Amino acid sequence: MTGLKTKGRSGCVLCRELVKWRYSNPLKKSVYDEFRQFLPIDHPFRRELAHYFNGVHETSPPPPRATAKDWLNTWNAARGPELPTTSRARLPPPGMNRLSIFHELPYWSDLLVPHLLDPMHIFKNVSKSLLSHLLGEKDNVAARLDLQLSNTKQDLWVQDQATSLESSLAPYKLENKDQVKEFFCRIKKIKTPTGFGAHLDNAFTEKDTYKGLKSHDFYNILRFHIHVAIQGMFDSNFSKSICRLSRLIRWLSKKCIHKEEIESMKQESFVVMALLQMQMSTSFFDGQVHLLVHLFEDISLLGPVPY
């Protein structure tokens, strides 16, 4: 219905062609692992602390938010009557498959949010991806090779495929099966004053996997449980980053949000994602993780997520 592409260079319909992305051959997917462009120009992550990322100074300004009118202008510029009627000229412009039929509505081009992002879908995918990385399911040779291609985390690069994964433990991965068992045990035993989340005790399978969790279960784990369950299992800096991520999700889920908080929380989301970029594997940063930072803009325009 939208007529827009949602993969590769066009993976973000809000950043459009200004999104920072690359295609990873080892991972066989598009990776959106650069969040420093959203930070202020004078932020130390852009230059002074670039060696903690990929060593490259980030100078790109934050991309402006694309609107329905921007997409309509892009289509008209590429398919205007002055262009020759050749097959190449008739191809849709980058990021578009066709012009959406919604543009026939007289008010559509004036909408600031023509297509609303689905917060629950994003929360679920981010939570599931985070769990799979903590449990070591995504820590494989392909992920380590991509770290080498992106020039990040040199201590995790593949030297010998037979022994590399065992000799260099990823800082975002639980050490052994005992820790994995303890992690699930903590989630099951977390008690709240109102009994919220008590059903998670029976949500996991007998082998302590999360395959039986529903979307709302992933959402609740990301909000309330995961930052408590990992305490003492990881480096303190990584645990703090996960705690700050959970705080962002809880804030996004509030029914009452003060306008003066929105900008500060949006800037906080940029910092948190940059910290995770510094600490997590590049395989974690797919399109859904990237869209998380745009939810704050939707709230500023449309109001709280529950409504």
Image (cartoon, rainbow, N blue to C red):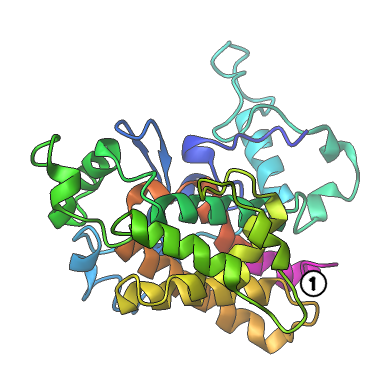
Q: Quadrant of the N terminus?
A: top right
Say which of 37 and 174 sits in front: 174
Region in magenta: 296-307
* Residue 140 figure quarter: top left
Who's the residue at 68% across and 35% down the image? 76
Name the side, left or right, on which 115 lies relative to 55.
Answer: right
Q: Residue furthest right?
A: 106
Of 133 and 231, which appears nearest the observer?
231
Q: Is residue 302 magenta?
A: yes
Residue at mark 1: 303
Task: Examine the rendering and report whether any part of residue 15 can be seen.
Answer: no
Is 176 inside the magenta-drawn segment? no
Please tell me whether mark 1 sits on a helix, a strand or a loop.
loop
Q: Quadrant of the C terminus?
A: bottom right
Q: Is residue 154 left or right of residue 66?
A: left
Name the quadrant containing residue 254. bottom right
Image location (x, y in percent) of residue 287: 52, 46
